Amino acid sequence: MSVEHAAIVGAGVAGLTAALALAKHGISSEIFEQAPSLDEVGAGLQISPNASRILGKLDVLDRLTALWLEPQAIRLISGTTLRELASVPMGDTARLRWSAPYGVLHRASLQGALLGAVQQNPLCTLHLGVRLESGDIPDGSRKADVLIGADGAWSKIRDKVADSPVSRFSGNIAYRFTVSAADARGALDQHSVAAYLGPSAHLVCYPLREADRFNMVAITSGHSTAQAWSGQPTAGQRQQLLSRFSRWNGTLLSLLEKSEEMTFWPLYEATHGKWQNGRDTVLIGDAAHAMMPFAAQGAAMAIEDAYELASFLAKRPVAEALRMFEARRVPRINRLRQRGAFNQFAYHARGPVRIGRDIVLSLKSPQSLAADLDWIYGYHAID
């Protein structure tokens, strides 16, 4: 059976990209989102070349390049001494090496660009304020040939897939906030993504051109208090954060102390499990494989999932397309999970391991570090 119409649950990055990718093949879709409006939470987002290449094919990239910043480098820096440990060239180098740009921007900018493209596409219909507790599509909607669960880490559509993944707390907390460019002047590099590394914690910082602010994400171990993505940290949680960074460089610690609007994000990940039911239902993005942000590929994997799923559905009967999609995507996701686990180990290293890490990084050339990313950034999704 060929696909003519799809039902997509969730209007985040995965769901909106899926609708646009399906429309590229002449397949219509309805997107069902429980929120009454699309107000993207969070702050910054990194769009690597493997994802920007796809956004270009969906005619979304030009909406972003007018807003985002293309960093000149990704820098790894000691959080205590501020000594640069390694630097991976980006900017023009990314465009030449991977034939697509690397950019950073606010999450709302990406969501807004995708939403604008969806609203302008006659094959895409968005329904807001529709809560699907059982995962069943509302009466009166067009019968769908395939149901796509793009509804995040707490997916309801998972219930329709036997042996599907479940979400579990990773033991890590992300504290997200922004600081004004004026407050960061002299302390943070306005032209790069910087990951400051320290024992049992790290801090990622990069400029948000469209907001004239810096995105800041501090990640360390902690305890989750609720099954939710974000909230305001309690006084105790905030104090725990500061204690983890108490021996860091004073400039960085001061930025943490002065942060006002901070969110407390317990980081959940999805276990291994089936992504499709062998007939007509499939999971993509965080619903299938929510993962830790240590490889900065969460949004990129959602975009890749959506694009490749649409490509398989356009060429194969539904059941076969879903099996082929899962078979292609799972090895890549598993490899990225391994990369993320390695990065966590390296970023949060202590004692002799930290010293060894610094020596190894100092011996790698920028070109060698870029080559380590070829399999991620140079990936070409199936058309």
Image (cartoon, grey):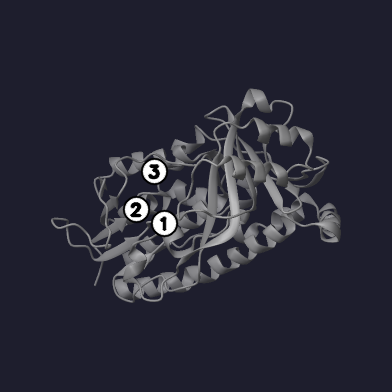
Q: Name the element at disc 1.
A: loop
Foreground mark, 1 or 3?
Answer: 1
Residue 340 lies in quadrant? bottom right
Q: In the rendered view, would you say 366 is above or below 205?
A: below
- How much space separates mark 1 and mark 3, taking CA atoms? 17 Å
Residue 2 lies in quadrant? bottom left
Image location (x, y in percent) of residue 56: 46, 46
Q: Is residue 248 visible?
A: yes
Q: Which residue is mark 2?
A: 10
Q: Is residue 90 visible?
A: no
User: Depth check: 220 or 287 in front?
Assistant: 220
Q: Name the element at disc 2.
A: loop
The numbered mark, 3 or 2, whose residue comes first in the sequence reads 2
Q: Is residue 331 left or right of residue 124?
A: right
- Quadrant for the N terminus, please: bottom left
Q: Is residue 117 left or right of residue 63?
A: left
Give, as a three-letter code, the residue at label 1: Gly
Q: In the rendered view, would you say 279 is above or below 283?
A: below
Numbered marks: total: 3
Q: Which residue is mark 3?
A: 114
User: Depth check: 31 or 352 in front?
Assistant: 352
Q: Are marks 1 and 3 in contact (CB under 8 Å)?
A: no
Image location (x, y in percent) of residue 46: 56, 45
Give, as a three-letter code, the residue at label 3: Leu
Q: Residues within 10 Å of mark 2 (few under 14, many from 20)?
A: many
Give, as a three-letter code, the residue at label 2: Gly
Q: Are marks 1 and 2 in contact (CB under 8 Å)?
A: yes
- How much space separates mark 3 and mark 2, taking CA atoms? 13 Å
- How much space separates mark 1 and mark 2, taking CA atoms? 7 Å
The numbered mark, 1 or 3, whose residue comes first in the sequence reads 3
- The residue positioned 68% from the left and 58% from the top of the image is 344
Q: Which residue is mark 1?
A: 152
